[in-house]
Image: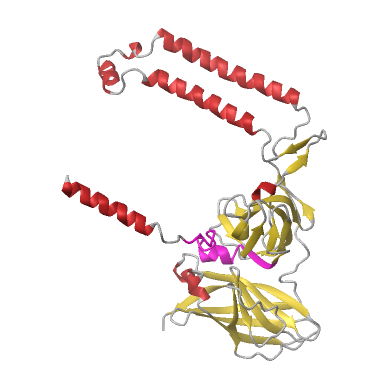
Amino acid sequence: MKSLFKPWLLAVLCINVLSIFAVPTAQAHGEKALEPFIRMRTIQWYDVQWSTQKFNVNDEVSVSGKFHVAEDWPISVPKPEASFLNISTPGPVLIRTERYLNGKPWTNSVALEPGGDYEFKVVMKGRLPGHYHIHPFFNLKDAGQVMGPGVWLDIGGDPADFSNTIQTINGEMIDMESFGFANGVFWHLFWGALAAAWLLWWVRRPLFISRYRMLDAGLELELITAQDKTIAKAVLVGVPVLVLALNAVTANQYPDAIPLQAGLDRILPLPAQVNAGLVNVDTLKAEYNVAQRAMLLQFSIDNRSQGAVRIGQFSSSNVHFMNADLANVNSKPGKDDVSNNGLSLDNDTPIAPGEQRTVTVEVRDAAWESEKLDGLIKDADSRLGGLLFLYDDVMGKRYISSISAAVIPKFN
């Protein structure tokens, strides 16, 4: 007994000691789980912003922004013929009240066009107080979730104050937090009890060995009795009749009910915001230096605009690499997904109107490794994608190009 008691006592003591250490909360929602080529070359987010990051229960908060559907859509990823914009949260901490795409309200999935530009807005209401990491994201059919940029939201107040009251078609005010709850619990218990009774009816008698012996002896017809057949017929007839009868009662009680929608919205993209034609960028080469954690990009830039332009930012998979020498690129110091000194050029002089120049850009930062983007060189589809932002210092204009290229790894 002593030899058994000591290990158990030691195990209990270890559990108690470990329980005093704080367990950190999860700070991500799988945004790094997808292969880099999917995150870089499907939904390319930009200008995403939140109306506020501190609010109380019942207060509204909105996230808005833009995204470009990459032309160089990966061949191994199904086309975005059914996509759904949602918000990734650690549980029901918010409720979504409104959603817009290109200024149009929409509730269903939507077919996106590769090469298209879209603007979105989602309005939500605070539900549970706390400190939460939140992302907008697109669910792509047969491909998975492509996360947008994440932020931390602080929701204050008392959870007991939360209200989710709506008005139905017939003018009745109902609380969505409790409406139909008792009815739902009753029918779950009813069908669960019916299923359990059906199983118990069959498993109450000897199983496996006894039944195998009867089958082996050619007595399979005696395994099912006349009473078994009677009960099976009653269930076979009774369940559909009950369902149809209850459906008729419900339809009579709620004659104006709208069924769940299963359509596919068709919303045309905006006029070209990315690759608009005034500043054309052609990617000539992409090399990734593993040791230096640096991506070397060579571009051919044809400036057809009316003013001189400079490269100010390269964005890929929600990581922004900024040109520190350009002051008006909306730098955001302190943000985890922004590298304010990560981008450098071999020639940073402005590209004049009508000029075509080959520019070499080095994007060097530990984010290639920490965001698991360097795994690109190990993928079967080793192609880079992202958005290149160019700025006109004088006229205050911005030009965006979606770029892509095969990546050549370098190990020295």
Q: Nearer the viewer, residue 135 or 208?
A: 135
Q: In the rendering, at what x and y percent does residue 353 appear?
A: 77, 86
Task: Report the residue at 47% width, 69% height from top.
Answer: 375
Residue at (59% x, 83% y) in the render: 343
Can residue 82 be seen in the rendering of this structure? Answer: no
Residue 331 found in image quarter = bottom right
Q: Would residue 34 be counted in the magenta stretch? A: yes
Q: Quadrant of the C terminus?
A: bottom left
Res. 279 in view: yes
Whether the magenta-drawn stretch holds residue 108 is answered as: no
- Identify which residue is drawn at 41% across, 21% down: 200
Q: Of residues 131 and 412, which is closer to you in this image? A: 131
Dividing the picture into quadrants, the one containing residue 312 is bottom right
Q: Is residue 21 above or below residue 296?
A: above
Q: Residue at x 56, y 19 (%)?
A: 239
- Could you tell whether 292 is left or right of 337 in the image? left
Q: Is residue 72 above or below residue 248?
A: below
Q: Position of residue 97 (x, y in %)?
A: 73, 50
- Within the image, what quadrant is residue 315 found in? bottom right
Q: Residue furthest top?
A: 226
**Position of 407 relative to 355 (above/below):** above
Figure label count: 0
Name the image quarter holding the N terminus. Answer: top left
Left or right, 49 with reference to 133: right
Highlighted magenta segment, given as a residue range: 24-48
Taking the view exactly as shown, the residue that stands out farthest to the right is 171
- Is residue 69 or residue 338 the one in the foreground? 338
17 lies left or right of 394:
left
